[in-house]
Amino acid sequence: MLSKKVTKDIQSLGLKKFRDESGLFVAEGPKIVEELVQVIPGQIESIFATEDWASAHPSEKVQLISEEDLQRLSQLKTPNQVVAVLKQFSPLEPDASGFCLYLDTIQDPGNFGTIIRIADWFGVKNVICSSGCADLYNPKVVQATMASIARVNVFYDLQDLWLHGQERIIYAASLQGKPLSSFSLARDGILLIGNESKGIREGFLSLAQEKITIQRRGEAESLNAAVATGILLSHLLP
Amino acid sequence: MLSKKVTKDIQSLGLKKFRDESGLFVAEGPKIVEELVQVIPGQIESIFATEDWASAHPSEKVQLISEEDLQRLSQLKTPNQVVAVLKQFSPLEPDASGFCLYLDTIQDPGNFGTIIRIADWFGVKNVICSSGCADLYNPKVVQATMASIARVNVFYDLQDLWLHGQERIIYAASLQGKPLSSFSLARDGILLIGNESKGIREGFLSLAQEKITIQRRGEAESLNAAVATGILLSHLLP
């Protein structure tokens, strides 16, 4: 059985305070953990797994635990075989060229993680986050990225100053823009995505040279921010 | 204070069994409830709201409740002013023409509801669901539709036979198809969306005349089913 101290330490990683202090975070489930082990082996601190997973993945980092221990460690409703503890990344200052995403106050962890997964699908290497975005290491964000957290550089613009002075063209997703179909492919640029209910803050929106609207043919009031990001990237990127 | 019976009856609508028996479902929060009251007033059975909302929306259907009652009634983590009880719809057999979506075993309630919202944004009037899809009246589905549940006809194909004999062109979202950019706009057709981890079942996939792939430029293994639906509709619909 796992010691109380280890159990408590891992459970505490559900809270940002303890993640910040320890520089660690948690990822769960065979699919995500196996991909992380492959892509970023150096970030893996330790792995706690039940018999099935542990026997198939022998490693000095893997500790065998009981189903009851797993229940205690897991942040998921349905714990699934394995919990990995990883070291947080040292994000790089984003490249000065190439297409990137700028997220303004995307607070919902599921949406935030899904956007990182979408960036990874479309080969967008840098995602810059305004001060009010969700925490990358929130367990719900990590799970929603589906291991894309290992491949996308997520950079926090804590002073909300990064967009100023950028020389790339800035596109903003907006309900009052030009129709998406009137835009051609872009090799370089910054796509600005806003909070679902409040949109992009005026101070940021005024920095955009191009405002893009996904044409609405029906009556829904808005699209989910992650869905809008996917649609825009699929049209804008070559 | 609300009676124990009423409280229990409304709480029980969190479970499919009781929703099926009563023919009722629940929607919550000012944004969604206000839109439902406007779009489908005849479906509203009763509304339970705290002072702020109730005083702004006087109606014989609105019953004033305390914050404590709201906590007890709500299925949300953060209850928000109002809980409405509505009558379920009588779904129509989908039109034999026009563009529609066919969902194969979309089980995640958030994804399922988001797809209905996307259909509504793009003016897709009919969404047909295979036998294994989530329940439309699951509270998480209802919340994710953001009131689009009132405008989209959701039809359950419980025998999994509906697709057979359809004369419209059937498109399938698939990782092994032709690139999306090679398709032109479609006024009529059926877009088949599969379960995220398992894809579209072979019996359905073989019915599709066209398999479409959203080109991957990066390394993520897959896209969320709702995001894929949004991308495909944004490219296919005129």
Image: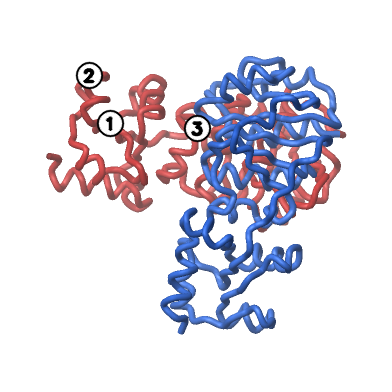
Chain colours: A red, B blue
Q: Provide residue B187's location: percent of width, then percent of height.
A: 86, 32
Residue A83 in view here? yes
Q: Are marks 2 and 3 on the same chain?
A: yes
Q: Amino acid at mark 3?
A: Leu
Q: In the image, what residue occupies the spot 53% across and 56% down? A: B20
Q: Chain letter of disc 1?
A: A
Establish if A177 lies above or below B54. above
**Quarter occupied by residue A82:** top left
Establish if B5 lies above or below B225. below
Quick one: SS at disc 1? strand
Q: Chain letter of disc 2?
A: A
Q: Amino acid at mark 1?
A: Glu
In the image, is B8 to the left or to the right of B21?
left
Q: Nearer the viewer, residue B52 or B86?
A: B86
Q: CA distance from mark 1 to mark 3?
A: 21 Å
Instruction: Estimate how packed mark 1 is, as few (under 14), some (14 to 19) or many (20 or more) residues with alpha carbons within 10 Å.
Output: some
Q: Which numbered dot is residue A92?
A: 3
Q: Amino acid at mark 2?
A: Pro
Mark 2 or mark 1, whichever is nearer to me: 2
Residue occupied by mark 1: A45
Residue occupied by mark 2: A58
Q: In the image, what residue occupies the spot 54% across and 30% down? A: B196
Establish if A43 lies above or below B87. above
Q: In the image, what residue occupies the spot 46% across and 47% down? A: A135
Q: Provide residue B166's location: percent of width, then percent of height.
A: 76, 27
In the image, is B220 to the left or to the right of A213?
left
Q: Nearer the viewer, residue A177 or A127?
A: A177
Q: Sequence order check: which comes first, mark 2 or mark 1? A: 1
Q: CA distance from mark 2 to mark 1?
A: 15 Å
Q: Provide residue A170's location: percent of width, then percent of height.
A: 74, 39
Quick one: SS at disc 2? loop
**1 and 3 marks in contact (CB < 8 Å):** no
